[in-house]
Amino acid sequence: MGLMHLGMWAALIAGDGGRAEELRELERQLAAPRPETRRAAVKQLVELGQRPAWELVCGALADADSQVADAAQVALARLDDARLLEELSGRLGLRHRDPWVRLRVAEAFGRLPRAIDGLELLAVLEPREPELARTLLWTLERQLAARRELGPRDKLAREVERLVEARIDPEVRGRALVVLARLEHFRSLPHVADCASAREPVLRCAALEAVEASGGWSEPQRLEQAVRGLADPEPEVRTVALSQLETLSTKPALIALARQLALEKRPRLRWRIQAFLRARSGEDHGADAAAWEAWANTVQGPWSTGPELSRRATHTGTGAQLAGLGIVSDRVAFLIDFSGSTWDTKVGDRTRKQVLDQWLREALEALPPETRFNVVPYTNDPLPWERNVVPAQRANIARALESFERSHARGRGNFYDAAVWAMSDPEVDTIVALTDGVPTGGRRYDMDLMVELLVERNRFRRIAFDSILVDAPKPRRAQWERLAHRTGGLCVEAQLD
């Protein structure tokens, strides 16, 4: 019977034989060969809401199919059984032998509508498992943001501070700094100062985020830190600073944005500044920094002075387009979905793949030579053309197109792993995904969950996700639009004909 206890079955049979039979049937469905059947069983078990049903849901976290395990992970946010939650803090969840179960439970705890024991979370945090460590810190951050009591704040702060001071993965240290800032503002101050001048850009990004997270910095202090971030040599740090100036949206912040428009060298960031100012003002001064500064000097408060305009700026950055999407970045990875629809759908006398060949050729051949790019088709796994972005020189473009046009890879569309792979290139500031909008491969299936996971993983990189959707179902379009909005990107639809 797996996780089910015989005593509980006996009680159910005695009290409600029909419900016990329903649970037995759903347990049988959890062993069905079709993942769609198992996923439906998880959802029905959640609706039953009884402890034996929830135990079966917890067991589904270990399902090898992403749509089943994701459904169980998402469902855990509705669990309100104190005893079962306690067991999930142990071998049933955070100390489970399967690393995927540990990771799924760690994330789900951040969405629980009730307080959890923060010290228990920190007790299982192991810096040698950086993905789990980052997730546990993210969960603490979300629970603190919801103003829940997670235990003695001094003890929590002391444990988190040890992580900030440790020589471990900078991504883990950075998240620990943000959590510490939420826990104890004054205790975080020397660490914010240290990280603001750290060698690793991740820690400089974390210092800026900690300023925003603590709630103890005045508006002029926040402005000062953000303006200082604009002078950073690394674009991801400048992107965090831009985001914070957008949040402030005061006259001094808007003036700083207008001035940065004249100084910024990276096309993606110039596009972002221009797009924000358009949306904020209801005006369009293009790339004229002086005109934008003159407008900013008229602002009296954090309000819009006109109708909101589209975030799509009037320039494309590089002048190139892919299927109607302007390529605004000079450091871009193109992710192309090679799942079944690429080969099975005909467009007149051509396959969809042949249309994609033409679209990619037109885009790459229009890239300025100073652009650096990579092409990453993906099926169950990412199939990168190069390890990192390369200059958009004629020889490289010819090699990329030859490789792409000759490829006949088939499989399910694992967008999540392809995106994570592309994010590992330190030069990339934009991912352009061309997809049917329905991820089907890998260990991630639920697109709403995927958006949150990618945004969190991206927090110290600030890569923009631009998406081109081809024949995507309407509910999926909203999810991809949310990913674009959360990362400062764009989402468009393309017609094959």
Image (cartoon, rainbow, N blue to C red):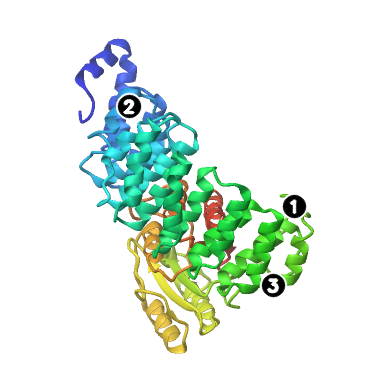
Q: CA distance from mark 3 to mark 2?
A: 58 Å
- Reading the image, the residue beneath label 2 is 53
Q: Which kind of residue does numbered mark 2 sit on? A: Ala
Q: CA distance from mark 2 to mark 1?
A: 50 Å
Say whether residue 67 is visible. no
**Which numbered dot is residue 287?**
3
Of residue 36 and residue 232, the one placed in the foreground of this image is 232
Q: CA distance from mark 1 to mark 3?
A: 20 Å
Quarter containing the N terminus: top left
All told, the count of numbered labels is 3
Q: Residue at x 42, y 57 (%)?
A: 195
Depth-wise, is mark 2 or mark 1 nearer the camera? 1
Which type of secondary structure does the marked residue at label 1 adopt?
loop
The numbered mark, 1 or 3, whose residue comes first in the sequence reads 3
Q: Position of residue 177 (x, y in %)?
A: 41, 49
- Reading the image, the residue beneath label 1 is 304
Q: Position of residue 444 (x, y in %)?
A: 37, 51
Q: Is residue 145 above or below residue 66?
A: above
**Which numbered dot is residue 403?**
none
Q: Residue at x 44, y 46 (%)?
A: 188
User: What crowding class fits label 2: few (fewer than 14 Cα within 10 Å), some (14-19), or many (20 or more)?
Assistant: many
Which type of secondary structure does the marked residue at label 2 adopt?
helix
Of residue 268 and residue 12, the one placed in the foreground of this image is 268
Q: Which kind of residue does numbered mark 1 sit on? A: Ser
